[in-house]
Image (cartoon, helix red, strand yellow):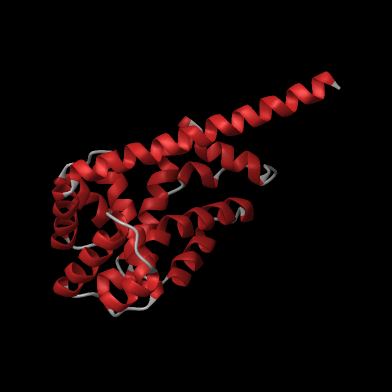
Amino acid sequence: MFDNLISISTEMSEIEIKQLTDNESYRKEYVNGIIILSDKFKNGENFDDICEQLKKEIHNEKLLKIIIADFEGNIKGFQETEYIRNLDLESFKRISKIIFEKVILETSTLEEIESLTGIDKEYIYCVLKFLKHSKQEIIVRRYSEKLFIESNYDIFRIKDDYSSFIFNLFKESKNELVVSVMMENSILLKNIKESVSTILDIFKEIIDE
């Protein structure tokens, strides 16, 4: 793990090291190393213990800092979905279906969703973020059910039957959601066009002065 990167010069700056980790010669080794660290954490190893072991193996402080930062970033989604993993399947189905119907398919107030689900807003946001992620994978990227289940396990350690339920929930409203995504994209394109137009107007004013 990180065998080739360990030997790089300590004289290199953080920016140079970061560029090196993106280089084709080192990229695969680096990504695989981050995945190995993340899997250790997801499988129950303590974060501080993993970092302490890294410090024993990597003596380049700048490289170590970059690795730990990317490691933290890679496990963020897993940490944020702890609430979902701790739900029993029936509770997960009930809460997810309410938030899906009240937020993904329509617009509702937070108070209404709190009342319907009986959970605090931080947990509502947790489930909602997961549903939005699912929308991207199922509707935008058009993941198959198998790929969706595998992806959710790799990233979040979400159980297969939980992911299967979400996949079917989205598929049942696929046509409506496709239209929703198209509308979102058209609004985004319109905003980009207006921003570009504003920038061009500013440049024109500067040139005319």
Residue 31 in the image, given as x and y percentages of width and height: 41, 45
Residue at 14% across, 56% down? 164
Quadrant in the rendering for residue 40 = bottom left
Query: How many numbered circles are shown?
Result: 0
Q: Nearer the viewer, residue 61 or 82?
A: 82
Q: Is residue 2 left or right of residue 120?
A: right
Residue at 53% across, 56% down? 69
Position above or below: 129 against 201: below
Res 113 visible: yes
Q: Nearer the viewer, residue 41 or 197?
A: 197
Position above or below: 10 against 65: above
Q: Nearer the viewer, residue 200 or 51?
A: 200
Position above or below: 202 against 30: above
Q: Nearer the viewer, residue 7 or 150?
A: 150
Residue at 17% across, 52% down? 167
Position above or below: 49 against 65: below
Res 157 visible: no
Residue at 54% across, 29% down? 193
Q: Residue furthest top?
A: 208
Residue 202 in the image, given as x and y percentages of width and height: 73, 29
Q: Is residue 17 left or right of residue 47?
A: right
Residue 72 in the image, given as x and y percentages of width and height: 47, 60
Residue 127 in the image, given as x and y percentages of width and height: 32, 65
Query: Looking at the rendering, in which quadrant would you find the C terminus?
Result: top right
